[in-house]
Every structure is written in C-alpha cells, then in structure tokens.
Amino acid sequence: MSGHELRRDAPSSQDSPRNLRGSRDSAEFVRGQVTVGVSLKTYFGHERARAWFGEVARRVGAHPAVAAGQVRFFVIPTYVQIPGALAAFAGTPVLVGAQDVSEYEPGAYTGEVSAAELAEIGVAVAEIGHAERRRLFGETDEITARKAAAALTHGLTPVLCVGETDRLQATDTSTRSSLSASAAATATIAQLRADLTGAPAGPVIAAYEPVWAIGAPEPAPTDHITAVTTALTEALAADPARAGSVVIYGGSAGPGLLTTLGDAVDGLFLGRFAHDPDALVAVLDEASALAASRDTTAARHQPNTETASIDRSLVTPVQSRGTDAGGAA
C-alpha cells in the first residue's frame, strides 16, 4: 500500500497491533511531502460537520497534490463525528484523526476511548497534549507521554502539540527577538522530550503551537516560528526512534503563512480558518507549491546555519526509551 492510502475495511482478529488502523504507512512522512491538518475542536454540531465533510471530501479528495501524495492531509473531528468522517473520506487519501486518546488499554475506564478501538475503526492520527487539554483538564507531560505511548503502541501517529505558554521576552530590546526564540526553543524541546519519555519508537507529527498565539489575530512572527521549528526538527532528526517525524506549525495559522515559512516547516495545523473550505483549499494549494519546489531526493532534515544563534545543545536526541516501531511499550 502506498504512503498516502488508507485501508477502510475492518481489520481481522489476526492483524498485528501495528496494522490495526489499516495501514501504518498511511500517516508516515514521504520525502518532499507537506503535511496539513485540521482540528474542528467542538465548533461544529453533528449535521454541520457532516456537511463540511461532504464538501471537503469533494474538493480536497480530488486535489491533485493530495491525490498524488505530495500533500498529506488529515482531519480531526470530535469522537462522535469520526464514523461520519471515515465514511465521507472513504476512497480518498484523507486521513481521519481523534482529538484525544486514552492513556489506558481497554478495560474498566468509564468514559475513555482507547487507542486500540480508534485504530480498529480506521483512525490514523491522534492529537495529544493540546494546550486546552493541559490548561482546562490538568493534563501533565507525564499524562501526555502515556497517551503518546498508547497511540504508538496501536499504530496511531501522535499529533503531539508542544509550545511555550507565555511569550518569552529579553530585557535587551536589541537582542529580544533572537533570545525570545532561543528561550522558546529550549522550553519546547524540553517539553517534547518529556512528552515522549517511554514511548515506543515511531514517527510523530510535532505541532508547534505557542500557546500565546492560539486564537490570536495573527500567528507568531515568522523568525520566531522558524527558529523554534528548526530546533525541533533537528532534535527529532537526532533521535533514530523518531525517524520519519515532521514538524508543523499551528496557532492562528491560515492562508499565506505556509508560503511565508517555506521550508522552515513541514506543514500547518489549522483551526478556525479551515472552517471555510475555500480557505482550506488555498492552504492546500500553497502546500502543493511548496512540495513541488522541494528536492524529493535530498534529505529534508539538515541543520540550518541561519539558526546558529539557537543553542546547539537543543538538538540532543529526544531520549525515547522505546521498542521497535509499533511495538508494546
């Protein structure tokens, strides 16, 4: 099965854990590929979500870059909306995700939704560690790490949300921008490392979302995003257990940003801007242009000399204490 196809039929009881969601490869990174994702949070009711799925399936499913695998696109609806999304996107390369996942295996955990069940029905990715989960529900890095482990164990690719809470500033205005970015990179890589402690080997989609930029009128400044995402990319690339991982940006992301950021990111994680299918298609068009401009035979993850101001100790491997990809923690 190719890197952009997803098997929709139910798995048999003989399927191994790494194949439970249909195709483990369907959410893995391909050289030159650009990743775009959308989380609907709980903005849409059931019928509005169904209508949006239908419109997006019609327009995005036929998008040349998505169809060719140059752009990997995923949609994360509410739990209740997942079956409708799977049905709407059946036969397309569009991946469907969940906005959360239980840290526990199936059992006596009332109200939880296990990674095993999500994988069974065809879910490909699981959003973990979003700032709202941390702030509103008290989720710690330890909880996030256990959820990431559960997802990887059952073949789900974590969309791991990381980012500094406050906009870090330097006292010297002449160096404020670079020092702010360096401090943000330090904090974010430490969070990434904590969130992957004990997780099995496997790729992740690291979504850099500075909390202060979520819901803001504008995204974080371009130079700030570039510095932090480059440091995250290097940290993941230094860890063999995370081969195939990518770094995307979220936080008031919308049309025009991907073109501005270029190769500083592997894609975008969209929120409310994607409620308008026209805006979503505009971003996918940008992603297509970016993918086409990349040399698919060259390594994507190489150190960027322009970010030399970032402390090089930040690229210490993310100390993952895992097993083989998809194996039990």
Image: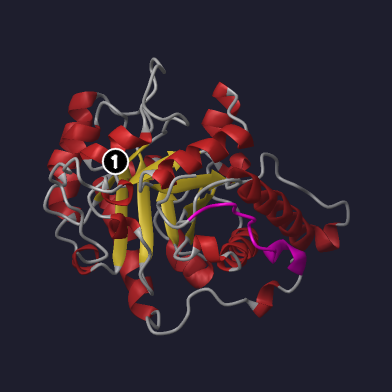
Specify the quadrant that holds the N terminus.
bottom left
What residue is shown at x 56% (from left), y 40% (from top)?
Answer: 145
Its colouring scheme is secondary structure
Counting from the top left corner in percent of width and height, residue 320 is at 59, 54
| Residue 172, position as x, y percentages in the image | 88, 56
Give the answer, above or below, for where 93 lies relative to 107. Answer: below
Up/down of 197 relative to 287, above or below: above
Q: What residue type is labelled 1?
A: Ala
Taking the image as drawn, is residue 258 in sight? yes
User: Residue 216 colored magenta?
Assistant: no
**Dominant secondary structure (helix, strand or loop) of the stretch shown in magenta:** loop
Callout 1: 10 Å neighbours few (<14), some, many (20+)? many
Q: In this view, does 186 lie to the left or right of 222?
A: right
| Left or right of 5 on screen, residue 303 | right
Task: Name which residue lies at 44% across and 65% down.
Answer: 244
**Vertical side of 17 occupied by 303: above or below:** below
Read off the magenta span. 311-323
| Res 99 → quadrant | top left
Please tell me which residue is depicted at 84% across the width and 57% down the height of the picture: 173
Expressed as whole percent of the image width and height from the top left, the position of residue 231 reads 64, 64
Q: Where is residue 283 in the image (x, y as percent from the top left)?
A: 34, 58
Please check the rendered image and state whether residue 312 is part of the magenta-colored stretch, yes or no: yes
Residue on which disc 1 sits = 119
Q: How many marks overall?
A: 1
Q: Residue furthest front?
A: 14
